[in-house]
Amino acid sequence: MDITTRTNTPLVPGNGIIDTTLSKAAVSIHGAVDRVAGAANEAVSTVNPAIDRVAQGAHHAVNSVAHVAGPATAWLRAQGSCLKTAQQKAAADTAQAISAHPWKALGIALAAGFLISRLAR
């Protein structure tokens, strides 16, 4: 009785056993790759709507901030120039008052310093 084992089978192209085995292996590998690709496509299709919703929310938030920031910036520019003008006027008035009454300004400064030192304790 002759028993042929696979280890004794020569690996030559055209051998029916090798071709069948390689075909089965290729089909099995292709099936596994197809399953992995299908799972990846399913994951992408599941995640894409969530990403789109987050992106839309971020765009909405940025647009809302930009909509509010524009008028606020204009208001700050207008108020900044008014405050700068008021500061310059106050400094000029103070300098004029000190020049007109130096002893009175010195007395007010000493009294203010004394009161601030008492309050700081």
Image (tube, rainbow, N blue to C red):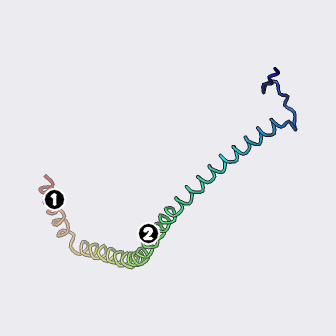
Front-most of residues 37 and 97? 37
Of marks 1 and 2, the one in the foreground: 2
Q: Is residue 65 left or right of residue 4?
A: left
Q: Residue at x 67, y 48 (%)?
A: 31
Q: Residue at x 19, y 65 (%)?
A: 106
Along the polypeptide, which appears first: circle 1 or circle 2?
2
Label 1 element class: helix
Label 2 element class: helix
Q: Residue at x 82, y 21 (%)?
A: 2
Number of the label disc, if any, that sits on residue 55: none
Instruction: Give the x, y percent position of residue 99.
Output: 26, 73
Asked which quadrant contains residue 60, the reply is bottom left
Q: Is residue 27 left or right of residue 89?
A: right
Number of the label disc, if any, that sits on residue 61: 2
Q: Residue at x 51, y 62 (%)?
A: 51
* Residue 77 versus residue 111 in the image, above or below: below
Q: Is residue 25 left or right of residue 43?
A: right
* Residue 117 versus residue 19 in the image, above or below: below
Gap in angstroms between the C-alphas marked 1 and 2: 47 Å
Task: Please name the residue that numbered disc 1 is placed on.
Answer: 116
Circle 2: residue type: Ala
Assign the N terminus to one quadrant of the image.
Answer: top right
